[in-house]
Image: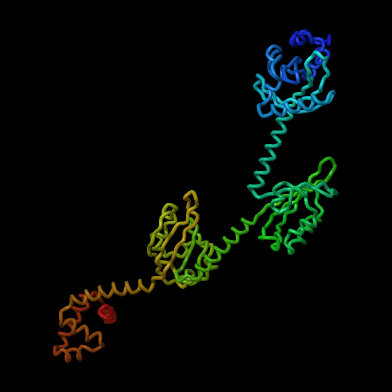
């Protein structure tokens, strides 16, 4: 004790029991960071303490001596502390180890490990207990971080429906995460199951694959992936994706595994496939033609009805540009609007395509853009109806109206002559039928051809036939 600096000794209390305090709590322990404290059993009032313990509290000697040690503990720990001291005082010369957090004037959280010793006192002295104290704050901090990390790890596994396991090569029993027990319906209290027990939870058709994966020789750095199902006889069937890999530590080969419940992904995938199947059935069985193109106009999907309009099979048109089948004059029409901005709006319009044979095909197009979550075009769907027949009727009607208008420019006699000419009669016969001269017939024929802007009898016949069609 004589080697301890005077500054440290000066922090000890000055009272009649000072020599005894020095003999027990000599400040020579200050250099090792070990705290010493002596306190009364009944009140826990601090009798003396060395510099290290005072530093744990962030107090000087005058601020600590005489104050109850329990007062420097969190309120929720004070009763447990009092109970420990009471038990210790009933067992002379006994020891007790406990860990408590100290609440002094320090800004940091201080945890201390106490080693309490019941010390005999004279008859006239109050019973006291001595203790050494070690600062375990860093260990506690690491333990709290570990607990937090484990909690986060378990939460992440729970949210992602993932469980993990570990087995040292050659060992009988390994380690399972909490989530792995839950995924495969095992009781954690029973410990990791044996391989046979685990295989009993696997679908009978998948057990051979699981056994093969486990039995496969695996070198560090390589991994095995597999999928398996749970036994439907034990409850609703689940789907699992598993990864097995090995690591090496301290010369030991360690098997590691991760199992993930992919039942929901499988369900969604099956629902997506079913939706796509139904969509294909609708597209293939639709009376209208359906064509889906990229923003650049490349045909991504086309049903048989749409392909047949152009004289092709669907497979022949997949991957081609819609512009390849556009009539050259129709490239100015809306479907030529391969510009992305035009594709962003729904539109109904008519356009002319080219048939494989070279003939014209008129279609009515109802265009609908398919957008992603950002509002960007990913595809454009078009519903096509063949209106070629209607277009021909419209053209015939238009031509008939024009022909009728031309015929209305003729006089009564000129129309009579026209009818005779269209019937194929000669001028002499026409003259006799109409009771006029042949020269008069020739004069009326000349006027008719001039008014109708034709050069031949064939053209006269055509106009007459077209004009009659609109009347019918």
* Residue drawn at (23%, 85%) of the image: 421
In front of the other: 340 or 260 = 260
* Count of marks, rendered view: 0
Q: Residue furthest left?
A: 436
The color scheme shown is: rainbow
Q: Is residue 213 visible?
A: yes
In front of the other: 174 or 350 = 174
Instruction: Using the image, determine if residue 465 lies above or below residue 274.
Output: below
**Can you tell which quarter of the image residue 396 is in?**
bottom left
Q: Position of residue 238 (x, y in %)?
A: 67, 58
Q: Position of residue 152 (x, y in %)?
A: 66, 40
* Residue drawn at (23%, 76%) of the image: 404
Q: Quadrant of the C terminus?
A: bottom left
In front of the other: 274 or 316 = 274
Q: Residue furthest front?
A: 123
Give the side of residue 456 with respect to residue 207, left or right.
left
**Can you tell which quarter of the image residue 63 is in?**
top right
Q: Quadrant of the N terminus?
A: top right
**Can you tell which quarter of the image residue 102 is in?**
top right
Give the side of residue 425 with respect to residue 88, left or right.
left
Instruction: Using the image, determine if residue 84 lies above or below residue 29.
Output: below
In front of the other: 290 or 38 = 38
* Residue drawn at (67%, 54%) of the image: 261
Q: Position of residue 13 (x, y in %)?
A: 74, 10
Give the side of residue 366 with respect to residue 120, left or right.
left
Q: Is residue 33 visible?
A: no
Q: Position of residue 80 (x, y in %)?
A: 72, 29
């Amino acid at each position: 004790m004589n080697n301890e600096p005077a500054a440290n000794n000066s922090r000890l209390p000055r009272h009649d029991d000072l020599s005894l305090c020095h003999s027990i709590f000599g400040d020579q322990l200050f250099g090792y960071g070990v705290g010493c404290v002596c306190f009364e059993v009944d009140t826990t009032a601090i009798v003396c303490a060395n510099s290290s313990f005072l530093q744990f509290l962030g107090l000087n000697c005058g601020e600590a001596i005489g104050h109850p040690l329990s007062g420097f503990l969190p309120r929720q720990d004070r009763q447990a502390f009092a109970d420990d001291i009471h038990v210790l005082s009933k067992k002379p010369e006994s020891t007790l180890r406990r860990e408590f957090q100290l609440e002094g004037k320090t800004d940091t959280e201080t945890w201390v490990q106490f080693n309490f010793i019941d010390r005999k006192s004279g008859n006239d002295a109050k019973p006291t207990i001595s203790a050494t104290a070690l600062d375990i704050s860093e260990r506690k901090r690491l333990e709290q971080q570990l607990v937090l990390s484990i909690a986060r790890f378990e939460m992440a596994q729970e949210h992602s429906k993932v469980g993990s396991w570990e087995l040292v090569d050659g060992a009988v029993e390994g380690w399972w995460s909490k989530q792995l027990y839950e995924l495969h319906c095992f009781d954690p209290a029973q410990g990791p199951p044996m391989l046979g027990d685990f295989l009993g939870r696997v679908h009978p058709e998948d057990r051979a694959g699981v056994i093969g994966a486990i039995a496969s020789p695996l070198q560090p750095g390589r991994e095995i992936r597999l999928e398996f199902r749970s036994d439907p006889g034990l409850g609703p069937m689940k789907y699992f994706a598993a990864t097995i890999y090995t690591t090496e530590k301290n010369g030991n080969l360690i098997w590691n595994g991760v199992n993930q419940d992919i039942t929901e992904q499988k369900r969604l995938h099956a629902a997506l496939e079913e939706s796509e199947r139904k969509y294909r059935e609708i597209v293939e069985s639709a009376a209208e033609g359906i064509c889906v193109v990229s923003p650049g106009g490349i045909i991504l999907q086309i049903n048989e009805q749409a392909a047949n309009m152009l004289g092709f099979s669907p497979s022949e048109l997949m991957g081609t540009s819609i512009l390849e089948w556009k009539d050259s004059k129709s490239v100015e029409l809306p479907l030529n609007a391969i510009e992305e901005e035009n594709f962003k709006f729904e539109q109904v319009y008519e356009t002319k395509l080219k048939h494989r044979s070279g003939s014209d095909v008129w279609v009515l197009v109802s265009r609908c853009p398919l957008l992603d979550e950002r509002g960007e075009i990913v595809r454009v769907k078009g519903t096509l109806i063949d209106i070629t027949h209607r277009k021909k009727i419209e053209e015939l009607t238009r031509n008939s109206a024009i022909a009728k208008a031309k015929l209305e420019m003729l006089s009564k006699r000129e129309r009579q002559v026209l009818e005779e000419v269209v019937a194929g009669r000669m001028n002499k016969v026409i003259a006799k039928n109409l009771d006029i001269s042949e020269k008069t017939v020739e004069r009326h024929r000349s006027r008719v051809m001039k008014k109708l802007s034709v050069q031949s009898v064939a053209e006269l016949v055509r106009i007459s036939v077209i004009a009659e069609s609109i009347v019918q």
